[in-house]
Image (cartoon, rainbow, N blue to C red):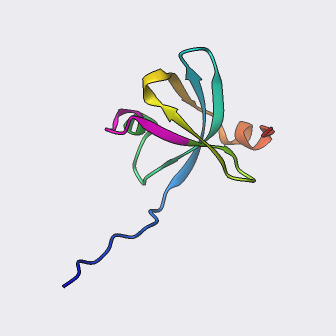
Amino acid sequence: MNAPSAPLKQETRRVFVSVKMHDGDRFRGYVHLAPGERIQDLLNDERKFFPIQMNSDVGEMAILSKKFVVSVEEVDDNKARSFAFS
C-alpha cells in the first residue's frame, strides 16, 4: 500500500530583503517563508544555503551560502515595489 504523498508545493509568503555578504556584496530580492516562519528561522535552520528570487518578472534566482551572510534586512513593501530590478 502506498503512503500518501506530501504536497509538492507549500504555501509561502514573499518577503523583500537586502542581504549583505562577507565581501560587501549585496543581494536584493525575495525570500519565501512558510506560514509563521521568520527570517531568523530561515537563517538558523539546518540548510547551508537558501534561495533568493532576484527578479520577480523572469524568476532569476541566486543560491546564497549562509556561511558568508553577514546580515539580512527586511525591506519595506513600498520600497520593494519602487525598486527597479536590473
Image position of 72 (left or right of 40): right
Where is 32 relative to 19, above or below?
below
Where is 29 relative to 27, above or below?
below
Asked if the stretch drawn in magenta spans residue 49, the answer is yes
Quarter of the image containing the C terminus?
Answer: top right
Question: Residue 45: percent from the left, percent from the top?
Answer: 33, 38
Where is 67 relative to 10, above or below?
above
Q: Quadrant of residue 62?
A: top right
Question: Residue 33: percent from the left, percent from the top?
Answer: 47, 48
What span is in magenta?
43-51
- The residue lying furthest to the bottom in this view is 1
Asked if the stretch drawn in magenta spans residue 37, the answer is no
Image position of 50 (left or right of 78): left
At 52% from the left edge and 33% from the top edge, which residue is drawn? Answer: 64
At 43% from the left edge and 67% from the top edge, which residue is drawn? Answer: 8
Question: Residue 2: percent from the left, percent from the top?
Answer: 23, 81
Question: Residue 20: percent from the left, percent from the top?
Answer: 58, 22
In the depicted view, which residue is nearer to us: 78 or 72? Answer: 72
Quarter of the image containing the N terminus?
Answer: bottom left
